[in-house]
Image (spheres, rainbow, N blue to C red):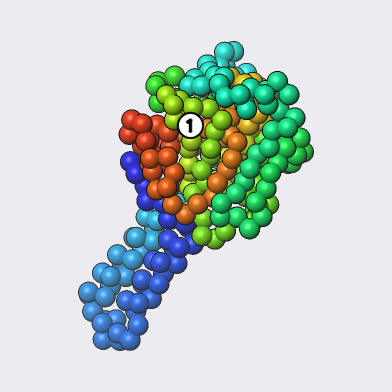
Amino acid sequence: MNTPIIPRRKLLGGLAAGAGLALTGCDRLNESDGFRSILRGAESLNKASQRLITDRAALAREFPESAMSPIFRMNGTISPASDEYQQHQREGFANWRLKIDGLVSKPMELSLAQLMAMPAREQITRHDCVEGWSAIGKWRGPPLGLLLKAAGLSTRARYLVFHCADFFDGDPYYESIDLIDAFHPQTILAWGMNGGMLPVGHGAPVRLRVERQLGYKHAKYVMRIEATDSLSGIGRGKGGYWEDEIDYEWYAGI
Ligand SMILES: Nc1nc2c(c(=O)[nH]1)N[C@H]1C(S)=C(S)[C@@H](COP(=O)(O)O)O[C@H]1N2
Ligand SMILES: [Mo]
């Protein structure tokens, strides 16, 4: 299902403004059945949008340590082939920098040490791949929302695009999410997994965890986070590698 992506304030503001418009200068209408049904319509629309928003904000289930999978499968790219990535890997990512740019007032370049010094969230969650396997793992890293606030995310931004270090069938892997997922409390840039550093096979030095979405949205090997108001100029325009490639849904909520 493709849910329209509307920022919360705009959605509620728009509905309120619509209801206000219907109210102005209509005293006679006020008494009519027609008007009451308009109000009822606005009310149920408001409730429906509220449900939509609270559903998107709900937390993914978290598990105890005892539920962690003894083996967590690696999928897709497990070792990016580029010389640049391999050099970073050899250097223990000491010279690697995460770029945050696009619609931000303070573009940033952060080292792995800086990311590791930020307040982190740790969560044990289940990863669900669209191919039909799941695994439970422990992830640790700063909430994406903290980084976006530090970078001064513009009010014009609608999406965050994650540009990755790896190519798949010749095309760069990328993914994107909207602001509701970006500021979801369980959306983190994970540098830690299962109590250690994130292994290369799972996306070192950092990968996205966006726990209310299917596996392919969890971009590994993130090199750059770009804030944008449109996905049309990126890749082939559908918001992600698999969306461009084989029509996977852009919104892969679970
Ligand atoms: N950069 C990058 N990110 C990626 C992929 C990939 O191939 N490249 N595969 C995706 C898919 S389909 C899944 S299921 C998960 C797999 O993560 P894992 O290797 O930690 O199991 O990463 C996702 N993120
Ligand atoms: Mo997947």
Residue displayed at 40% across by 20% down: 132
Name the residue tied to disc 1: 173
Task: Locate the N terminus by quadrant.
Answer: top left
**Label 1 environment density (alpha carbons within 10 Å; few <14, some 14–19, many ≥20):** many
The foreground one among 114 and 36 is 114
Q: In the rendered view, would you say 222 is above or below 83?
A: below
Residue 196, how many percent across, how many down?
A: 71, 22
Q: Is residue 48 above or below residue 169?
A: below
Residue located 45% across and 67% down the image? 13
10 displayed left or right of 183: left
Nearer-the-camera pick, 16 or 30: 16
Residue type highlighted by circle 1 = Tyr
Beta carbon of the mark 1 residue lies under 8 A of ligand 1: yes
Q: What residue is rendered at 48% in x and 32% in y? A: 172
Name the spot of residue 236 as percent of width and height, x first: 38, 40
Is residue 15 at all visible to an observer of this figure? yes
